[in-house]
Amino acid sequence: MARPDPLDQEEGLTPGRFGHAPSLWLALPLLAGCALDAGWDFSPGWPIIVGVTAAAALWRLHHRPLLGPALIVLAGMSLGCAWHHLRKAPRGPVTVRRAFDEISVRIERAAPRAKTEDGWTGLGVVTDRDGPYHRRRMVLSGRGRCPTAGQELRLAGRLSAVERETGGYASWARSQGATLRLAGASTLGVLEPASDFAEWCRGRRERLDLWLRTAPWPDETGGALLAATLLGRTALIPPAEREAFERTGTLHLFAISGLHIAGMAAAMAWAARRLRLPSLPAGLAGLAALWTYVQVTGAAPSATRAWIMAACLWAGRLGGRHASPVQSLGVACAVTLTLSPEACSDAGFQLSYLAVAALLMSGGPAAQLLTGPSEAELATPPSARPMLARFTGRLRRAVVGGLCVSFSAGVAGAPLTLAAFGTASWGGVFANLALVPMSAPPLLLGMASAACMIWEPLLAGAVWLNGAAAAWLRMMGWLAERMAATPGLTATMEGLPAWTGPAWAGGLLVLLLSQAESESPKRLLGGPVLALALWVATCASLF
């Protein structure tokens, strides 16, 4: 968030200062409305009436200093509440009539299991209009060839209601809005095929998976880690390494996120400058390539968010304007909720957006304040400083900055993972400090190897890129296993209601916005810590 004039004596984040990120006026009311309907299941009639009335009044009264913002919030919350209600799948209790059933399902997403296992898992929506489960969302696991997203299939398998206990697979299923589970599914027929683009993405994904496992020497573990890194599929990670990354809070390294998008964008920008391509066509081509990569890898919430933020930053730079990252985050949130309002209940959506908000409004500013040059350093030319002093200065900035960023993200995400899965890794603050920088080389090597697939003469050399990346990831896995052996690395809180995580997210977001313009690192980092302590104490006493 851009900081105002330091001579301005006004303190705090007043409504007028939302102008530094005007997209928040759209994203936050929309998010609040979706969250309200997710928690209380409003009827859409009154929210539509209130939202349309507030929007009509806003047309005439937008210039009023207090009434205008109030009408924006009211219209956004009301319309967001109604839109979420109209789009969401039924979530009430469901009674399963037959343990084995045939059912029609539209596949939302599906992925094959790890190479050592047979079958596939996925998520779908029931399309049987005459049955009792119409529009219910269900988690799927089946045998045979993995289906393509967008297909409508007739499936047969063991049908059951999603359990009500907390933690593990059931908690993840409920966070996706699923109330049914179909296990051991067999495909009886295809009612509607997937689109040509979906089939093309599936083919590219399977080809990338096979290619990234190709190395000069047999290395199934390293190849699986490299495929998981580039495709964002944690199911491909071998069990031992997966457990180590989970315990150290670094499993997010294998999710398609800002690290992947930023790395690819930087590589394409470098190539465009070298080739002296016009900025507008090169930028549009780069965004199209990034969007295709996001779709091929499954369009996860973190990947979609990173692409929209990249598009906003590029558009601002092209127009000669400074595009605030918070502004880009607000746009990404608003676009995501407009297309899929039910995403507000997705644990992946909540973790992705809250962690980035904490980085931008807490960890990042605190790191800049703590690692900024001193007055003596500003007065001394870099060439006049001893080499050792320059090295120690860079090392200090890297360590302190990394700790601030990792600490803020860890504090923001811990209550969400505790409420959803009953466990969180406090040791991830230190594990991320080592493993996040280490994740860049294999990512860049894998991207270079994938780019070489388009020209056959480069394939022989690209195999060695795969081998180097796989060896590096094996080293990261070994380091994660050593860190995971540390006793007391994770915290557990069983039995927390599911709503306590989103409640924490909303409260922390308000706190971050209220202190976003602070110049005190203690306040930037200490405020979320005090809020976390209050949340833990409250949950421990009540639940």
Image (cartoon, rainbow, N blue to C red):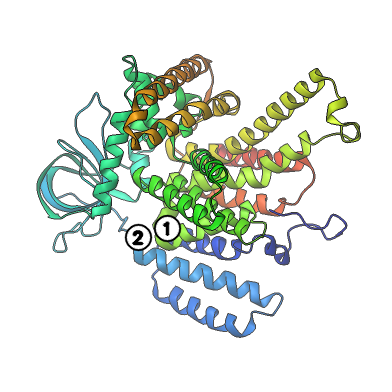
Q: Is residue 145 left or right of residue 53?
A: left
Q: Which mark is residue 88?
A: 2
* Residue 540 image offset from top left, x and y in percent: 55, 36
* Residue 265 image offset from top left, x and y in percent: 52, 44
Q: Amino acid at mark 1?
A: Ala
Whether the residues at callouts 1 and 2 have beta carbons within 8 Å, the answer is yes
For discs 1 and 2, the disc positioned in front in the rendered view: 2
Could you tell which of marks 1 and 2 lies nearer the N-terminus? 1
- In this figure, which residue is indicated by the disc labeled 1? 38
Q: Which mark is residue 369?
A: none
Per the model, the C-alpha gap separating discs 1 and 2 is: 9 Å
Image quadrant where residue 531 sits: top right
**Residue depicted at x 50% and y 41%:** 416
* Residue 18 image offset from top left, x and y in percent: 68, 63
Q: Is residue 538 left or right of residue 322?
A: left
| Mark 1 Cα shell of 10 Å, populated few (<14), some (14-19), many (≥20) | many
Q: Residue furthest left?
A: 188
| Residue in front for this viewpoint, 18 or 32 | 18
* Residue 336 image offset from top left, x and y in percent: 45, 57
Q: Dot 1 lies on which element?
A: helix
* Residue 513 visible, this angle: yes
Image quadrant where residue 133 sits: bottom left
Placement of 328 over or under 433, stated as above or below: below
Q: Amino acid at mark 2?
A: Lys
Q: Is residue 272 left or right of residue 186?
A: right
